[in-house]
Every structure is written in C-alpha cells, then in structure tokens.
Amino acid sequence: MRLIETAAQLAEAVEAVSRDKWVGVDTEADSLHHYVEKLCLVQVTGESGDWVFDPLAPLDLTPLVRVLEKKSLIFHGADFDIRILKKFYGFSPLQMFDTMIAAQILGYQKQGLADLTERHCGIRLSKSEQKADWSIRPLTKKMLDYASNDTHFLNTVRLELQKELAAKGRTVWHEETCSKLIQTATAEREPVPVNAAPWQIKGASDLAPKALTMLRQLWLWREEEARRRDWPSFKVLGSDYLIEIARWADSHAGEDIASWPEAPRNVRGRDHDAIQTVLKEASLMPASVYKRKPKPKLQSPKRWGNQEKKIFEALKAERNALASENGIHPSLLATNAVLEILTLEKPKTREAIIALECLLSWQIDLGGDRFLKAMRS
C-alpha cells in the first residue's frame, strides 16, 4: 500500500492506475465527527497495487477522478462513494460493479464487505476503525491498513459474485441496478426552495401547532450549536429528542425541562439553560403550520380510496411472494413507493408499466404480469 500525499506522488500513481483494466474504489469522510463533511481519503486498488490518496494533504485529486471515470470500477455500497466524489470532483462513472448489490440480488443474508471477504477470500477484516475520525493527521498505520483493505479484496469478491450471478441468470439484474444507481447518484439535485422547512423532520407532522414552533426553534438552536462546536448535529441532540422535547414542553407549559423524567443528560446539564431559554422564547411566538412535502407527480391527479387500498395490499402481497420465491428482499423487486405509483396509475399492460419508468426491465420481466393480474383481481 502506498500513501499519496504530494503532487509528484499523485502524478506517478495516476499514470499507474491509468493502465489498470479494473479498479476498486472506496472513500472515507468525517461526517460522524464534524459539522461540515469533508472527503478525507480515496482508496484505490488495481493491477498496479493498493493506493491511498489524501485530499487533505492538501491534494487535488481531479486527475485521478478523470481517470477513474473511464475505468471498469468496483465498489461495495457505491451510493455514498459516488455522491461524495460527485460533490467534490464532479465524478460521473461510466460503469461499475457493486458487490453489495450483487450480494442482495443473490439473496445473501450477510452483505457487509467483511462478510463477503471472509466468505470468498477466507480473510476476516477488522472493523475497529469503522467509526474513526478520518480527518485527523497523521493517520495511524492501523487506520491506513483498514482503509486499504476496503479495496484490496474487491476484485476477488467481484469475480466470485459474477460467477454466482451468471449461474442464477441474474447478471442483467445486477447490471441494470448498478446503472440505475449511477444515474440517481450523479443526478443534479434541485436547489432547496427558499421557503423550505428543513426543521420539519420525521415525526413533526404529529405535533400540535405550538409544539411545532418549539421544534423549529430547537432545530435552529441545534444547527447553530453544531456549527459552532464543529460537531455533527446528532451529537448535539438527536432528532427524536427534539420531537419529544417539543411535545413535552407544549403539554407542560412553563415547567422546567429538567423536570421531564426522560430528559437526556445534556438537557439536564450542559445545555439546560440554553434549551430552557429557547423553549421560553418559542412559547411567546405564533404557532407554526406543518407543510407536507409534495409527492412525486403522477401522470394524472388521483385519489387514494378504498379501492386503491385493496389494490396496494394485493400488489404488496404479490411482491412479497415473488421476492420470497426468488430469495431476495422485497424492496429489491419493488419499493412501496413504486407500488403506490402502480396503484394510482393502474396500468393495464406491460407497455403501460414501462411508460411509468418506475421499474427496471428485469423487475418488469420478473413481476410485471403478476402485478397486472393482482391489479385486475
């Protein structure tokens, strides 16, 4: 394994990697430890060897990324890696093999990289550095070994999984799913609307209007504290607790939050005064209104009634039965969101299902006719 920290080392490594026919790729970031996420490492393994690139050296990895885009790449759980490389370097891979997706399609019970490496290489990888702060420098030998191992065995695992996919006739399933992942992970995200309400987190819709105001102010305080301390937001206060504090404070007007029996330690101690002030100020503000997020646009406006409920349940039962028959997780065949689209659009033919663009070709080949039958019945 070679650690790349200088421009000269980078030029040499890029030249070597450019000759590789296949390349395993992984990344490490620091979102578990800091408010603003940074790309901390890029690990690469090819026929040329194992390389660990340090963008915090600082080092501009653009030349490496441009080479990787033209290669046959191997990832394990590619979604995060593609997104973060896209964010920092405009990464858009041409093709890739995702070992985690392959394990899912093959119906593996254990799909982690360590599990696949032990199964196909006879090597048990250490997980000791899984939650390490990758922004610290210098990196320890233990951290570098851990990072390098994340790509070192990928090709061996890939070759074994390819054999199993071919034996089960599921190679196309994997190829289409990987292509779709590349498409979604590299898609340009729509800008956040000016009137967006990111504080309306999961569970907010159940709160009373006054409690919603408290949630909003608590969320704003948490984000400011996280930024000031350079902590990820959840380390200041978890979102579940924000909801519960807002609910409790609304039903115990004027009471000290420390008297809440289930209050976390920091709410009773370190952050007590700040949170109590936030709640007091929020109690004097106008009540808030919950704004539901717009659902994906359907081809035509539809209502969800008793008939739709029956159709959805029939589709779900058929989906689950078909997944069980093929030894895969139901969501791999069709997510509940996809079943909702089918329920509301009520396609009558395979061609109509294809036109909805919510299922891949292999999913339609496997379940299209049975979905149509379920809807007709």
Image (cartoon, helix red, strand yellow):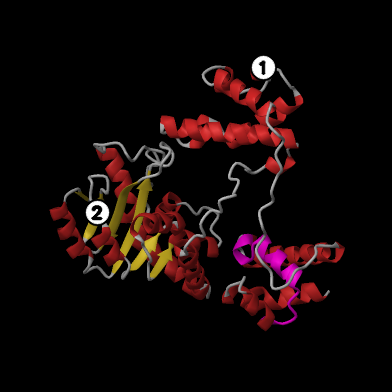
Against 69, residue 111 (above or below) is above
Against 320, residue 211 (above or below) is above
Q: Amino acid at mark 2?
A: Asp
Query: Considering only order in the chain, which callout, 2 or 1, is on the residue closer to the N terminus?
Result: 2
Q: Residue under circle 1?
A: 256
- Using the image as rendered, state which of residue 204 and residue 10 is in the foreground: 204
Label drawn at residue 345? none
Q: Amino acid at mark 1?
A: Asp
Residue neighbourhood size for the residue with mark 1, other residues' Cα within 10 Å, grouped as few (<14), some (14–19), many (≥20):
some
Look at the image and say whether residue 339 sits in the magenta stretch: yes
Q: Is residue 245 visible?
A: yes
Q: Is residue 106 visible?
A: no
In-image side of 358 versus 69 (left or right): right
Q: Position of residue 234 (x, y in %)?
A: 52, 35
Pointer 1 with pointer 2, Cβ within 8 A? no
- Using the image as rendered, state which of residue 65 and residue 128 is in the foreground: 65
Q: Position of residue 235 (x, y in %)?
A: 49, 32
Q: Position of residue 375 (x, y in %)?
A: 79, 73
Identify the residue at horizontal 67%, vertical 35% (top origin): 213
Q: Residue under circle 2?
A: 60
Identify the secondary structure beneath mark 2: loop
**Main structural element of the magenta stretch: helix, strand or loop?**
helix
In-image side of 121 versus 351 (left or right): left
Q: For marks 1 and 2, give the CA distance.
A: 51 Å
Identify the residue at horizontal 52%, vertical 52% (top origin): 110
